[in-house]
Amino acid sequence: MVKVLKPSDVTKAGPLAASSVIIGKVVRVHIRALPPINASEEAAGKNKGTKGRGSKHKGRKSKGSADADGSRQVLELYVCAGLLPSQVILIEIWDAGRIKTLSQQLTQGCVVQISGVKIAQHTAKSRPWTTSRLDYILKEDGPKTTVKPVENEKLNVETPDWHPLTAISALQHLPDKTLVCLAGVVLEPAASISTQQSLKDGDEFEVSNAWIRNGTECIRLCCYRDLAPLALDLVVRSVVFIESVAKYYSEDRGLEVVAVHRARFSCPPDQLATMINACSPPTMNDCSSVSIIAESISSEEREAHRDYENEDAEWTSLSVIAAVANCKEQREIKTLYQVPSIFLAMDDSLTYQGCSKCKKGCKQIDAMESPQPACSCGAEMQSYWRGKIMCTDASGDVFLADNVFILC
């Protein structure tokens, strides 16, 4: 008699029993590229019984079959039976022929039956590059391994067609570098790519930041270096499905998720998009409110005269405003936010001069001094109003914006 297992039933390393099969739904398909093997390395590997990297790896076999050009790939299938990330298991397929066949047969949302695999325990090296939270991983075991689609009725557990999501509030409990899948509304997309300097070696690198909201919670999404352009494609108020981003926390930047090379941004299924939109707070047009506008206004926009009275505003709370309008980050914010029943307190203001692009070199204007020279980035200096704004609301949330620069 065949014993049917769910992915979460895998609790021991070793070969899967011949009388057992694992049934689950494919919630994610990913093909990972591996470093190519050139002819000399392959010959060396055959002669020495190594991976082609010298005697240090003597006795180890090369994983995966290479194509004619020496390139290699591994097919990652994430299979789930349930609603939680802890019910997802990963199976790796290394054979080039089987990768081609399965990538054509299997699609996200189909139910599969797995047999003849090896069960291996995750290590410190393997865990950071998988979104599976289980302690075990399934690996191909030659011709014995079979992965075939079956009828949906064989999966008797409610399972979504997409990879189970991690709640934003749950990120704080996960170790750094844990890969997660998120979905939410683009609260504030990246306006541009900025340049930062590494504190370790002084090298400059590109970075872009966006904010994602799910319900009343929000998280900063960071894209660094060659991945910086990813955040530029996000559209404000659109629902986005984010796969494989790493959780990080630091005292200076707080909680955030960082895009890695296996990250992917896409439109979620209609059912998921409807659920996310439904959990977002409604707009309270009948509520006494004050609109908070955090925006760097260009001369073209100033001439356009945005109609804030009739423009749609994002309903939010002061805690979200405090996260989005982080004074430590320089970026253009064009979204109009609406918070009910807030109270403003403003300190005396001073007029300063600063760069019109990066805001560097802000200095109090002295009537006896000539205008400041252009910034190193090439932009002209402009006059800014500098002050402090304190906001409180009925819930007790406090938002303090210090050293706020507003174009005069």
Image (cartoon, grey):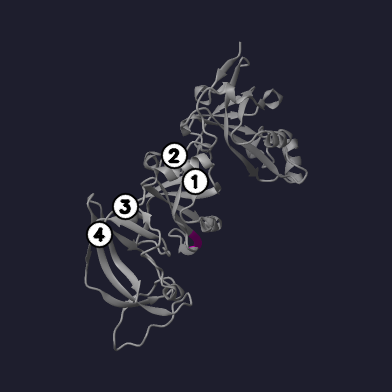
Residues at marks 3 and 4, CA–CA distance in whole angstroms: 11 Å
Residues at marks 1 and 2, CA–CA distance in whole angstroms: 11 Å
Q: Name the residue under label 1.
A: 245
Residue range of the region highlighted in magenta in the rendering: 203-207
Residue occupying image coordinates x 47% and y 38% = 165
Residue occupying image coordinates x 71% and y 33% = 98
Of 234 and 280, which appears nearest the observer?
280
Q: Residue 166 carries which label?
A: 2
- The kind of residue tagged 2 is Thr
Q: Earlier in the sequence, mark 1 or mark 2?
A: 2
Task: Name the magenta segment's main secondary structure.
Answer: strand
Q: Which residue lies furthest to the front in this view?
A: 286
Residues at marks 4 and 2, CA–CA distance in whole angstroms: 31 Å
Residue occupying image coordinates x 61% and y 31% = 110
Q: Residue 102 carries which label?
A: none
Q: Mark 4 points at which residue?
A: 391
Give the percent coordinates (x, y) of residue 74: 65, 38
Quadrant housing the C terminus: bottom left
Q: Which of marks 4 and 2 is nearer the N terminus?
A: 2
